[in-house]
Amino acid sequence: MENLSPWVLFFAAIFTGNILLTYFLGMCSFLSVSRQVKTALGLGLAVTFVLTITAAVNHIIYFHVLVPLGIEYLRYIVFIGVIAATVQFLEMFIERYSEVLYINLGIFLPLITVNCAILGVSLFMVIRQYTFIQSVVFGAGSGLGWLLAILAMAGIQERLNEKKIPPPLRGPGIALIITGIMAMAFIGFSGMVQIQ
Amino acid sequence: MAAPGIRDIIREDLWKNNPVTVQVLGICSTLAVTNLLLNTLIMGLGLTFVTAFSALTVSLLRNVIPPRVRMIVQTLIISSYVVVVDITLKAYVPDISKALGPYVGLIITNCIIMGRLEAFSSSNKPVPALMDGVMSGIGYSWVLLVIAFFREILGFGTVIGIPVMDPLMKAMGSSEGWIQWSFMIMAPGGFFMLAVFIWVANTLSAKKVTHSQ
Protein backbone atom coordinates (compact mmCIF):
# COMPACT_ATOMS: atom_id res chain seq x y z
CA MET A 1 0.00 0.00 0.00
CA GLU A 2 2.88 2.35 0.79
CA ASN A 3 3.99 2.96 -2.79
CA LEU A 4 0.57 3.42 -4.37
CA SER A 5 0.52 6.74 -6.19
CA PRO A 6 -2.19 9.13 -4.94
CA TRP A 7 -3.33 9.79 -8.51
CA VAL A 8 -3.88 6.13 -9.21
CA LEU A 9 -5.81 5.84 -5.97
CA PHE A 10 -7.87 8.90 -6.81
CA PHE A 11 -9.01 7.60 -10.19
CA ALA A 12 -9.48 4.10 -8.87
CA ALA A 13 -11.77 5.42 -6.12
CA ILE A 14 -13.87 7.28 -8.68
CA PHE A 15 -14.11 4.68 -11.43
CA THR A 16 -12.95 1.15 -10.80
CA GLY A 17 -13.70 0.93 -7.11
CA ASN A 18 -16.70 3.22 -7.04
CA ILE A 19 -17.90 3.34 -3.45
CA LEU A 20 -21.54 2.97 -4.47
CA LEU A 21 -21.44 0.78 -7.54
CA THR A 22 -18.90 -1.76 -6.36
CA TYR A 23 -19.12 -1.57 -2.57
CA PHE A 24 -22.85 -0.81 -2.21
CA LEU A 25 -22.18 2.01 0.22
CA GLY A 26 -24.45 5.01 0.54
CA MET A 27 -27.43 3.23 -1.02
CA CYS A 28 -30.10 4.63 1.31
CA SER A 29 -29.66 8.27 0.45
CA PHE A 30 -28.79 7.28 -3.12
CA LEU A 31 -32.22 5.75 -3.65
CA SER A 32 -34.20 8.40 -1.80
CA VAL A 33 -32.54 11.62 -2.96
CA SER A 34 -31.93 10.79 -6.61
CA ARG A 35 -35.10 12.32 -8.00
CA GLN A 36 -33.76 15.68 -9.15
CA VAL A 37 -30.38 16.63 -10.56
CA LYS A 38 -30.13 19.77 -8.43
CA THR A 39 -30.65 18.10 -5.07
CA ALA A 40 -28.44 15.20 -6.12
CA LEU A 41 -25.65 17.65 -6.89
CA GLY A 42 -26.06 19.34 -3.51
CA LEU A 43 -25.99 16.10 -1.58
CA GLY A 44 -23.09 14.77 -3.64
CA LEU A 45 -20.99 17.85 -2.95
CA ALA A 46 -21.78 17.72 0.75
CA VAL A 47 -20.80 14.04 0.88
CA THR A 48 -17.52 14.70 -0.93
CA PHE A 49 -16.71 17.51 1.46
CA VAL A 50 -17.48 15.57 4.62
CA LEU A 51 -15.74 12.44 3.30
CA THR A 52 -12.49 14.27 2.67
CA ILE A 53 -12.47 15.91 6.08
CA THR A 54 -13.48 12.84 8.08
CA ALA A 55 -10.98 10.62 6.26
CA ALA A 56 -8.21 13.01 7.30
CA VAL A 57 -9.38 13.43 10.90
CA ASN A 58 -10.06 9.74 11.41
CA HIS A 59 -6.66 8.85 9.97
CA ILE A 60 -4.90 11.07 12.48
CA ILE A 61 -6.98 9.83 15.40
CA TYR A 62 -6.70 6.16 14.49
CA PHE A 63 -3.00 5.94 13.72
CA HIS A 64 -1.77 8.48 16.26
CA VAL A 65 -4.12 7.96 19.20
CA LEU A 66 -5.95 4.64 19.05
CA VAL A 67 -3.08 2.47 17.77
CA PRO A 68 -0.43 3.73 20.24
CA LEU A 69 -2.91 3.25 23.10
CA GLY A 70 -3.86 -0.22 21.86
CA ILE A 71 -7.59 0.50 21.79
CA GLU A 72 -8.27 -0.09 18.09
CA TYR A 73 -11.51 -1.88 18.89
CA LEU A 74 -13.03 1.45 19.91
CA ARG A 75 -12.66 2.74 16.35
CA TYR A 76 -16.34 2.34 15.44
CA ILE A 77 -17.47 4.52 18.30
CA VAL A 78 -14.71 7.06 17.71
CA PHE A 79 -15.27 7.24 13.95
CA ILE A 80 -19.01 7.69 14.20
CA GLY A 81 -18.43 10.36 16.85
CA VAL A 82 -15.97 12.20 14.62
CA ILE A 83 -18.38 12.02 11.69
CA ALA A 84 -21.32 13.33 13.72
CA ALA A 85 -19.19 16.10 15.19
CA THR A 86 -17.75 17.09 11.79
CA VAL A 87 -21.21 17.30 10.28
CA GLN A 88 -22.50 19.35 13.21
CA PHE A 89 -19.52 21.67 13.12
CA LEU A 90 -19.73 22.08 9.38
CA GLU A 91 -23.39 22.95 9.63
CA MET A 92 -22.71 25.68 12.17
CA PHE A 93 -19.74 26.95 10.20
CA ILE A 94 -21.61 27.16 6.91
CA GLU A 95 -24.63 28.75 8.58
CA ARG A 96 -22.41 31.44 10.05
CA TYR A 97 -20.30 32.27 7.03
CA SER A 98 -22.15 31.46 3.83
CA GLU A 99 -25.87 31.81 3.55
CA VAL A 100 -25.93 30.67 -0.07
CA LEU A 101 -24.05 27.50 0.74
CA TYR A 102 -26.23 26.89 3.78
CA ILE A 103 -29.42 27.10 1.79
CA ASN A 104 -28.04 24.72 -0.82
CA LEU A 105 -26.17 22.25 1.36
CA GLY A 106 -27.61 22.76 4.83
CA ILE A 107 -30.59 20.46 4.55
CA PHE A 108 -28.41 17.56 3.42
CA LEU A 109 -25.90 17.71 6.21
CA PRO A 110 -27.92 15.85 8.89
CA LEU A 111 -28.57 13.09 6.33
CA ILE A 112 -24.87 12.55 5.93
CA THR A 113 -24.20 11.25 9.42
CA VAL A 114 -26.05 8.07 8.58
CA ASN A 115 -24.60 7.76 5.09
CA CYS A 116 -22.74 4.47 5.15
CA ALA A 117 -20.22 5.67 2.59
CA ILE A 118 -18.64 8.04 5.11
CA LEU A 119 -18.02 5.42 7.76
CA GLY A 120 -17.15 2.90 5.06
CA VAL A 121 -14.30 4.99 3.72
CA SER A 122 -12.81 5.38 7.19
CA LEU A 123 -13.04 1.63 7.77
CA PHE A 124 -11.49 0.81 4.38
CA MET A 125 -8.67 3.19 5.21
CA VAL A 126 -7.91 1.21 8.37
CA ILE A 127 -8.13 -2.20 6.69
CA ARG A 128 -5.96 -1.17 3.73
CA GLN A 129 -3.49 0.72 5.93
CA TYR A 130 -3.46 3.91 3.85
CA THR A 131 -1.01 6.69 4.60
CA PHE A 132 -2.35 10.16 5.43
CA ILE A 133 -2.13 11.49 1.86
CA GLN A 134 -3.63 8.30 0.48
CA SER A 135 -6.54 8.53 2.93
CA VAL A 136 -7.38 12.10 1.97
CA VAL A 137 -7.16 11.29 -1.74
CA PHE A 138 -9.20 8.14 -1.26
CA GLY A 139 -11.84 10.12 0.66
CA ALA A 140 -12.08 12.82 -2.01
CA GLY A 141 -12.12 10.28 -4.84
CA SER A 142 -14.82 8.18 -3.22
CA GLY A 143 -16.91 11.28 -2.65
CA LEU A 144 -16.58 12.32 -6.29
CA GLY A 145 -17.37 8.79 -7.42
CA TRP A 146 -20.52 8.84 -5.33
CA LEU A 147 -21.41 12.28 -6.71
CA LEU A 148 -20.95 10.97 -10.25
CA ALA A 149 -23.18 7.97 -9.59
CA ILE A 150 -26.01 9.92 -7.94
CA LEU A 151 -25.90 12.62 -10.63
CA ALA A 152 -26.20 10.08 -13.42
CA MET A 153 -28.98 8.37 -11.52
CA ALA A 154 -30.90 11.62 -10.99
CA GLY A 155 -30.58 12.46 -14.68
CA ILE A 156 -32.02 9.09 -15.63
CA GLN A 157 -34.78 9.28 -13.00
CA GLU A 158 -35.93 12.67 -14.30
CA ARG A 159 -36.45 11.18 -17.74
CA LEU A 160 -38.02 8.06 -16.31
CA ASN A 161 -41.01 9.96 -14.94
CA GLU A 162 -42.91 9.88 -18.22
CA LYS A 163 -42.03 6.31 -19.12
CA LYS A 164 -44.34 3.33 -18.74
CA ILE A 165 -42.92 1.09 -16.03
CA PRO A 166 -44.65 -2.06 -14.78
CA PRO A 167 -46.34 -1.06 -11.49
CA PRO A 168 -44.50 -3.53 -9.21
CA LEU A 169 -41.17 -2.20 -10.45
CA ARG A 170 -41.94 1.48 -9.91
CA GLY A 171 -39.73 3.26 -7.43
CA PRO A 172 -36.95 1.20 -5.90
CA GLY A 173 -37.27 -1.72 -8.30
CA ILE A 174 -36.45 0.17 -11.45
CA ALA A 175 -33.89 2.29 -9.60
CA LEU A 176 -31.99 -0.85 -8.63
CA ILE A 177 -32.05 -2.21 -12.17
CA ILE A 178 -30.64 1.07 -13.47
CA THR A 179 -28.00 0.99 -10.75
CA GLY A 180 -27.12 -2.53 -11.84
CA ILE A 181 -26.67 -1.43 -15.44
CA MET A 182 -24.57 1.52 -14.28
CA ALA A 183 -22.44 -0.84 -12.21
CA MET A 184 -21.92 -2.99 -15.31
CA ALA A 185 -20.82 0.05 -17.27
CA PHE A 186 -18.35 0.94 -14.54
CA ILE A 187 -16.84 -2.54 -14.69
CA GLY A 188 -15.63 -1.45 -18.11
CA PHE A 189 -13.24 0.92 -16.37
CA SER A 190 -11.52 -1.88 -14.52
CA GLY A 191 -8.85 -2.26 -17.20
CA MET A 192 -7.69 1.28 -16.47
CA VAL A 193 -6.38 1.02 -12.91
CA GLN A 194 -6.68 -1.68 -10.29
CA ILE A 195 -6.58 -1.38 -6.56
CA GLN A 196 -7.27 -3.91 -3.93
CA MET B 1 -50.80 3.69 18.98
CA ALA B 2 -52.09 0.95 21.28
CA ALA B 3 -49.56 -1.59 22.43
CA PRO B 4 -49.22 -3.89 19.42
CA GLY B 5 -49.52 -7.65 19.95
CA ILE B 6 -46.65 -10.00 19.27
CA ARG B 7 -48.44 -11.49 16.25
CA ASP B 8 -48.87 -8.08 14.65
CA ILE B 9 -45.20 -7.34 15.15
CA ILE B 10 -44.20 -10.60 13.51
CA ARG B 11 -46.49 -10.12 10.53
CA GLU B 12 -45.51 -6.50 10.03
CA ASP B 13 -41.77 -7.04 10.22
CA LEU B 14 -41.49 -10.25 8.26
CA TRP B 15 -43.65 -9.42 5.29
CA LYS B 16 -46.13 -6.54 5.27
CA ASN B 17 -43.71 -3.85 6.21
CA ASN B 18 -40.49 -5.68 5.44
CA PRO B 19 -37.59 -3.25 5.78
CA VAL B 20 -35.92 -4.36 2.56
CA THR B 21 -38.73 -4.88 0.07
CA VAL B 22 -41.14 -2.22 1.23
CA GLN B 23 -38.95 0.46 2.71
CA VAL B 24 -35.70 -0.34 0.83
CA LEU B 25 -33.70 0.68 3.85
CA GLY B 26 -30.32 -0.32 5.10
CA ILE B 27 -29.22 -2.47 2.23
CA CYS B 28 -25.84 -0.75 2.11
CA SER B 29 -24.15 -2.69 4.84
CA THR B 30 -25.35 -6.09 3.81
CA LEU B 31 -25.98 -6.35 0.10
CA ALA B 32 -22.23 -6.39 -0.43
CA VAL B 33 -21.78 -9.71 1.36
CA THR B 34 -24.66 -11.50 -0.37
CA ASN B 35 -22.47 -13.35 -2.86
CA LEU B 36 -21.90 -16.11 -0.32
CA LEU B 37 -24.66 -17.66 1.75
CA LEU B 38 -22.51 -18.31 4.80
CA ASN B 39 -21.26 -14.72 5.02
CA THR B 40 -24.80 -13.45 4.70
CA LEU B 41 -25.96 -15.77 7.46
CA ILE B 42 -23.28 -14.56 9.85
CA MET B 43 -23.98 -10.97 8.91
CA GLY B 44 -27.72 -11.48 9.43
CA LEU B 45 -27.13 -13.00 12.85
CA GLY B 46 -24.87 -10.11 13.84
CA LEU B 47 -27.39 -7.59 12.62
CA THR B 48 -30.28 -9.27 14.41
CA PHE B 49 -28.26 -9.33 17.62
CA VAL B 50 -27.46 -5.63 17.35
CA THR B 51 -31.02 -4.66 16.43
CA ALA B 52 -32.55 -6.72 19.22
CA PHE B 53 -30.30 -5.56 22.00
CA SER B 54 -30.16 -1.92 21.03
CA ALA B 55 -33.97 -1.97 20.84
CA LEU B 56 -34.10 -3.45 24.34
CA THR B 57 -31.58 -0.96 25.71
CA VAL B 58 -33.24 2.06 24.17
CA SER B 59 -36.62 0.90 25.43
CA LEU B 60 -35.28 0.44 28.96
CA LEU B 61 -33.70 3.88 28.89
CA ARG B 62 -36.56 5.58 27.07
CA ASN B 63 -37.56 7.71 30.05
CA VAL B 64 -34.00 8.63 30.97
CA ILE B 65 -32.56 9.76 27.61
CA PRO B 66 -33.06 13.49 27.10
CA PRO B 67 -34.81 14.05 23.75
CA ARG B 68 -32.22 16.55 22.55
CA VAL B 69 -29.32 14.12 22.54
CA ARG B 70 -31.46 11.10 21.66
CA MET B 71 -29.81 10.38 18.31
CA ILE B 72 -26.28 10.48 19.68
CA VAL B 73 -27.16 8.21 22.58
CA GLN B 74 -28.84 5.75 20.23
CA THR B 75 -25.85 5.74 17.90
CA LEU B 76 -23.54 5.07 20.83
CA ILE B 77 -25.71 2.20 22.02
CA ILE B 78 -25.70 0.67 18.53
CA SER B 79 -21.93 1.11 18.19
CA SER B 80 -21.28 -0.61 21.50
CA TYR B 81 -23.18 -3.71 20.38
CA VAL B 82 -21.42 -3.65 17.02
CA VAL B 83 -18.08 -3.68 18.84
CA VAL B 84 -19.27 -6.79 20.71
CA VAL B 85 -20.23 -8.49 17.43
CA ASP B 86 -16.96 -7.51 15.77
CA ILE B 87 -14.78 -8.81 18.59
CA THR B 88 -16.77 -12.03 18.84
CA LEU B 89 -16.46 -12.69 15.11
CA LYS B 90 -12.74 -11.97 15.20
CA ALA B 91 -12.26 -14.40 18.05
CA TYR B 92 -14.36 -17.33 16.83
CA VAL B 93 -14.54 -17.09 13.03
CA PRO B 94 -11.49 -15.04 12.01
CA ASP B 95 -11.73 -16.05 8.32
CA ILE B 96 -15.28 -14.83 7.95
CA SER B 97 -14.51 -11.73 9.97
CA LYS B 98 -11.77 -10.96 7.45
CA ALA B 99 -14.04 -11.62 4.48
CA LEU B 100 -16.73 -9.34 5.87
CA GLY B 101 -14.14 -6.58 6.15
CA PRO B 102 -15.60 -3.18 6.91
CA TYR B 103 -19.19 -4.32 6.58
CA VAL B 104 -19.54 -5.48 10.20
CA GLY B 105 -18.70 -1.97 11.37
CA LEU B 106 -21.14 -0.58 8.87
CA ILE B 107 -24.02 -2.15 10.79
CA ILE B 108 -23.86 1.08 12.81
CA THR B 109 -25.04 3.17 9.90
CA ASN B 110 -27.70 0.68 8.91
CA CYS B 111 -30.80 2.83 8.71
CA ILE B 112 -33.08 -0.02 9.76
CA ILE B 113 -31.76 -0.16 13.29
CA MET B 114 -32.03 3.57 13.80
CA GLY B 115 -35.44 3.56 12.13
CA ARG B 116 -36.81 0.86 14.43
CA LEU B 117 -35.35 2.55 17.50
CA GLU B 118 -36.98 5.84 16.55
CA ALA B 119 -40.29 4.41 15.44
CA PHE B 120 -40.81 1.67 17.98
CA SER B 121 -38.39 1.17 20.86
CA SER B 122 -38.31 4.73 22.12
CA SER B 123 -42.06 4.64 22.79
CA ASN B 124 -42.73 1.01 23.76
CA LYS B 125 -42.13 -1.33 26.69
CA PRO B 126 -38.95 -3.48 26.71
CA VAL B 127 -40.52 -6.85 25.81
CA PRO B 128 -42.35 -5.73 22.65
CA ALA B 129 -39.30 -3.63 21.75
CA LEU B 130 -37.00 -6.66 22.00
CA MET B 131 -39.51 -8.66 19.98
CA ASP B 132 -39.67 -5.96 17.32
CA GLY B 133 -35.88 -5.79 17.19
CA VAL B 134 -35.54 -9.54 16.71
CA MET B 135 -38.27 -9.64 14.09
CA SER B 136 -36.94 -6.70 12.07
CA GLY B 137 -33.55 -8.38 12.11
CA ILE B 138 -35.02 -11.65 10.88
CA GLY B 139 -37.29 -9.91 8.39
CA TYR B 140 -34.23 -8.25 6.97
CA SER B 141 -31.99 -11.30 7.05
CA TRP B 142 -34.32 -13.71 5.30
CA VAL B 143 -34.63 -11.47 2.27
CA LEU B 144 -30.86 -11.21 2.02
CA LEU B 145 -30.50 -14.96 2.52
CA VAL B 146 -32.79 -15.57 -0.45
CA ILE B 147 -30.74 -13.17 -2.55
CA ALA B 148 -27.51 -14.77 -1.37
CA PHE B 149 -28.84 -18.24 -2.15
CA PHE B 150 -29.46 -17.34 -5.78
CA ARG B 151 -26.25 -15.39 -6.16
CA GLU B 152 -24.14 -18.20 -4.75
CA ILE B 153 -25.84 -21.04 -6.59
CA LEU B 154 -25.64 -19.22 -9.94
CA GLY B 155 -22.28 -17.58 -9.37
CA PHE B 156 -20.33 -20.43 -7.82
CA GLY B 157 -22.70 -23.36 -8.33
CA THR B 158 -22.60 -24.07 -4.60
CA VAL B 159 -24.81 -23.80 -1.52
CA ILE B 160 -22.84 -22.84 1.62
CA GLY B 161 -19.73 -24.12 -0.16
CA ILE B 162 -21.19 -27.50 -1.15
CA PRO B 163 -21.14 -28.03 -4.93
CA VAL B 164 -24.71 -28.49 -6.11
CA MET B 165 -25.01 -27.38 -9.72
CA ASP B 166 -21.97 -29.26 -10.99
CA PRO B 167 -23.19 -32.77 -10.04
CA LEU B 168 -26.67 -31.78 -11.18
CA MET B 169 -25.51 -30.77 -14.64
CA LYS B 170 -23.36 -33.90 -14.95
CA ALA B 171 -26.32 -36.05 -13.93
CA MET B 172 -28.32 -34.40 -16.66
CA GLY B 173 -25.73 -35.50 -19.20
CA SER B 174 -23.73 -32.30 -19.67
CA SER B 175 -20.03 -32.96 -20.13
CA GLU B 176 -18.86 -29.50 -19.10
CA GLY B 177 -20.63 -29.32 -15.78
CA TRP B 178 -21.83 -26.02 -14.40
CA ILE B 179 -20.57 -22.88 -16.08
CA GLN B 180 -20.33 -20.22 -13.41
CA TRP B 181 -22.20 -16.97 -13.87
CA SER B 182 -19.35 -14.79 -12.67
CA PHE B 183 -21.64 -11.82 -13.29
CA MET B 184 -23.70 -12.86 -10.26
CA ILE B 185 -20.70 -12.62 -7.94
CA MET B 186 -19.92 -9.10 -9.04
CA ALA B 187 -21.73 -5.99 -7.85
CA PRO B 188 -24.30 -5.67 -10.69
CA GLY B 189 -25.57 -9.16 -9.88
CA GLY B 190 -26.44 -7.96 -6.39
CA PHE B 191 -28.36 -4.98 -7.69
CA PHE B 192 -30.28 -7.06 -10.20
CA MET B 193 -31.13 -9.80 -7.71
CA LEU B 194 -32.52 -7.27 -5.23
CA ALA B 195 -34.52 -5.59 -8.00
CA VAL B 196 -35.98 -8.95 -9.04
CA PHE B 197 -36.81 -9.79 -5.43
CA ILE B 198 -38.64 -6.49 -4.95
CA TRP B 199 -40.46 -7.06 -8.21
CA VAL B 200 -41.67 -10.49 -7.16
CA ALA B 201 -42.58 -9.32 -3.65
CA ASN B 202 -44.57 -6.35 -4.95
CA THR B 203 -46.37 -8.50 -7.50
CA LEU B 204 -47.34 -10.97 -4.79
CA SER B 205 -48.62 -8.34 -2.38
CA ALA B 206 -50.52 -6.60 -5.18
CA LYS B 207 -52.25 -9.92 -5.96
CA LYS B 208 -53.17 -10.37 -2.31
CA VAL B 209 -54.82 -6.95 -2.20
CA THR B 210 -56.93 -7.60 -5.27
CA HIS B 211 -57.96 -11.01 -3.93
CA SER B 212 -59.09 -9.71 -0.57
CA GLN B 213 -61.17 -6.95 -2.16
Image (cartoon, rainbow, N blue to C red):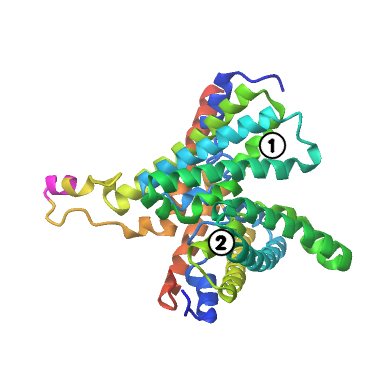
Q: Is residue B50 above or below residue A88?
A: above
Number of numbered callouts drawn: 2
Q: Residue furthest front?
A: A69
Residue A142: quarter of image: bottom right
Foreground residue among A188 and A173: A188
Q: Which residue is painted at 44% across and 58% down in the image?
A: B188
Q: Which mark is residue A67?
A: 2
Disc 1, SS: helix
User: What is the chain identity of the residue bearing mark 1?
Assistant: B
Span colored in magenta: B168-173
Structural crowding at the residue carrying mark 2, measured as other residues with C-alpha within 10 Å and reported as few (<14), some (14–19) or many (≥20): few
Is A165 covered by the magenta stretch? no
Q: Position of residue A181 (x, y in %)?
A: 47, 61
Q: Position of residue B157 (x, y in %)?
A: 26, 50
- The mark lying in front, picked from 2 and 1, is 2
Q: Where is mark 1, residue-wise?
A: B118
Structural crowding at the residue carrying mark 1, measured as other residues with C-alpha within 10 Å and reported as few (<14), some (14–19) or many (≥20): some
Q: Which residue is painted at 46% across and 48% down in the image?
A: B194
Q: Is residue B96 left or right of residue B157?
A: right
Q: Which mark is residue A17?
A: none
Foreground residue among B179 and A52: A52
Q: Position of residue B211 (x, y in %)?
A: 51, 25
